[in-house]
Amino acid sequence: MVKRMKEVYLYGAGNIGRDIYGKIKNTCNVKGYLDSDPAKWGKTLDGVPIVGGIDSIPELQYDEIIITITTERDAVRNVLLGAGAPVDKINTEYVNTYIGARLNFIQDLSEVYKNDAEGFAVAEGGVFQGDFAKAINSNFPDATLYLFDTFEGFDVQDTFKENERGYSDSKSGRFSNTSIELVMSKLPHPRKVVIRRGYFPKTTKGLEEERFFFVNLDFDLYQPTLEGLRLFYPRLSNRGVILVHDFFTQTFHGVARAIEDFEKEVGHCLIKLPIGDHCSIALVKTE
Ligand SMILES: C[S@@+](CC[C@H](N)C(=O)[O-])C[C@H]1O[C@@H](n2cnc3c(N)ncnc32)[C@H](O)[C@@H]1O
């Protein structure tokens, strides 16, 4: 007997929704997306209809609504409950893994390699509102943390190349709703933090002698990811790690491409370890 596929809606028709759809489309019957933005209603994402917002919930038949929004997850869950979705039909498993695995990874890494990390700096390329910068700063309290971002979102010179080559349909100015003050307010050890504001890699002067134990590359786009690998990989300590977000994404194809092109430049394959968030890849340096 053929087992009936679970019928689901995805709450959140954005990049993470697309990624989760890619993971489950062969094992679940994805009937559609729900989204709070009325401008998306009636459209499709990868052929899947965006059927409406929370007001549609009482009319829908489903086994589960899968939350795909990473921020304010409890608030989103409460909104769905308030709209009449039964508690046992709201699935936060995917989004918890997406966020939680990366946080567990950095915590465990800092514990296992406490001694190796000593004396080295850490960094993040692509900071946005500082949520992962907070995790880096908390887990490496003694290390200087360099943070690189325009703090004005994607730059047109990157998005132009990105769109031209078909890596993504990213728009300039995306992720501009942030500020240095907001980021700094989240960091537990602000005195260890050096902000490098502006277009990366133009903001990297003076780092020639610096060595790094951990770098999170989360620029989303091909060119700054490639530049990040060129800058940080040669300056990584033995057993140091560059974590590259969006390696497995359905949305930002330039990231995996940048790693591939960097491997061609250095003439060998990098050690690549998935970390279980279905999104990031850890590049481990061995000398
Ligand atoms: C997805 S967000 C980073 C999310 C963040 N790491 C987190 O975990 O919350 C990507 C960031 O990369 C920044 N960015 C992309 N290209 C850049 C470039 N060439 N120079 C500086 N910042 C860049 C954007 O401004 C944006 O804030």
Image (spheres, helix red, strand yellow):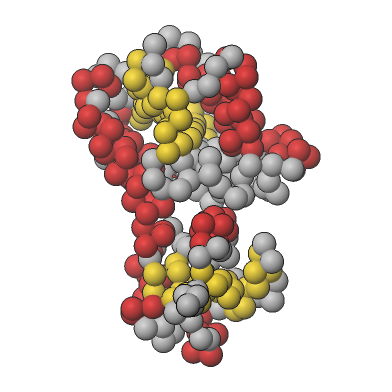
* Image point (58%, 36%), residue name: 256
Does residue 131 lie above or below 207 as drawn? below
* Image point (48%, 19%), residue name: 233
Taking the image as drawn, is residue 188 in sight?
yes
Does residue 88 lie above or below 171 as drawn? below
Residue 25's spot in the image, x, y percent? Answer: 56, 63
* Image point (49%, 89%), residue name: 58
Quadrant of image for the C terminus = top left
Residue toward you, 247 or 42: 247
Query: What residue occupies the far right of the structure in this picture?
Result: 164
Residue 69's spot in the image, x, y percent? Answer: 46, 62
Rendered image quadrant of residue 96: bottom left
Rendered image quadrant of residue 223: top right
Taking the image as drawn, is residue 152 in sight?
no
Rendered image quadrant of residue 43: bottom right
Does residue 173 lie above or below 70 as drawn? above
In the visual, does 136 lie left or right of 177?
left
In the visual, does 181 lie left or right of 36?
left
Residue toward you, 180 or 205: 205
* Image point (61%, 49%), residue name: 251
Residue toward you, 163 or 248: 248
Query: What residue occupies the far front of the structure in this picture?
Result: 1
Query: What residue occupies the far bottom of the structure in this picture?
Result: 59
In the visual, does 77 lie left or right of 171?
left
Residue 217's spot in the image, x, y percent? Answer: 49, 33
Total numbered circles: 0
In the visual, does 6 lie left or right of 103?
right
